[in-house]
Amino acid sequence: MSNKPLFQHRHFCKIAEIIASIPHEPSRMIVADHFAVSLRSSNAQFSEDRFRAAALGNPSGRDKVRS
């Protein structure tokens, strides 16, 4: 098996963007937390805090999805 991370930054950004589009805030927070915990083992560089911020609609400049 390869040591290559299962997910990359662009994948985390897209997932966070989708979660951020959930209109009901309590649901969005629950989903963001579940994803953050589940994704932490998919890449050694994954940051739960950065992911949660992006998923709750507050991404840093680097975490915004690029078209």
Image: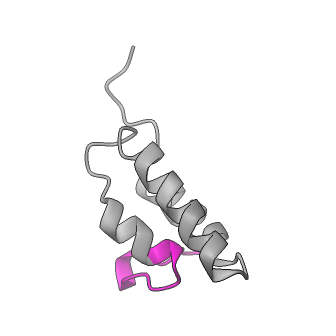
Residue 34: image x %, image y %?
52, 53
Pick out the residue farthest to the right.
23
Residue range corresponding to the magenta coloring? 54-67
Q: Using the rendered view, name the quadrant where residue 41 is placed.
A: top left
Q: Is residue 40 above or below residue 13?
A: above
Q: Is residue 29 left or right of residue 37?
A: right
**Magenta-colored stretch includes residue 55:** yes
In the image, residue 26 sits, relative to residue 6, either above or below, namely: below
Residue 36's spot in the image, x, y percent? 44, 55
Q: Is residue 11 left or right of residue 25?
A: left
Q: How is the image coloured?
A: one colour
Q: Which image quarter holds the C terminus?
A: bottom right
Image quadrant occupied by the N terminus? top left
| Count of marks, rendered view | 0
In the image shown, does 16 or 1 lie closer to the viewer? Answer: 16
- Camera-nearest residue between 28 and 26: 26
- List x then y, in percent, for residue 64: 48, 78
Q: Residue at x 46, y 75 (%)?
A: 54
- Position of residue 11 measured from the top left corner of the image (x, y, whole percent): 53, 55
Eyeballing the image, is 28 above or below 2? below
Residue at 26% across, 51% down: 45
Residue 51 figure quarter: bottom left
Q: What type of secondary structure mainly makes up the magenta span? A: loop
Q: Residue at x 36, y 77 (%)?
A: 62
Is residue 8 rendered magenta in the image? Answer: no
Which one is nearer the viewer's eye here, 15 or 8?
A: 15
The extreme top residue here reads: 1
Compared with 52, 6 (above or below) is above
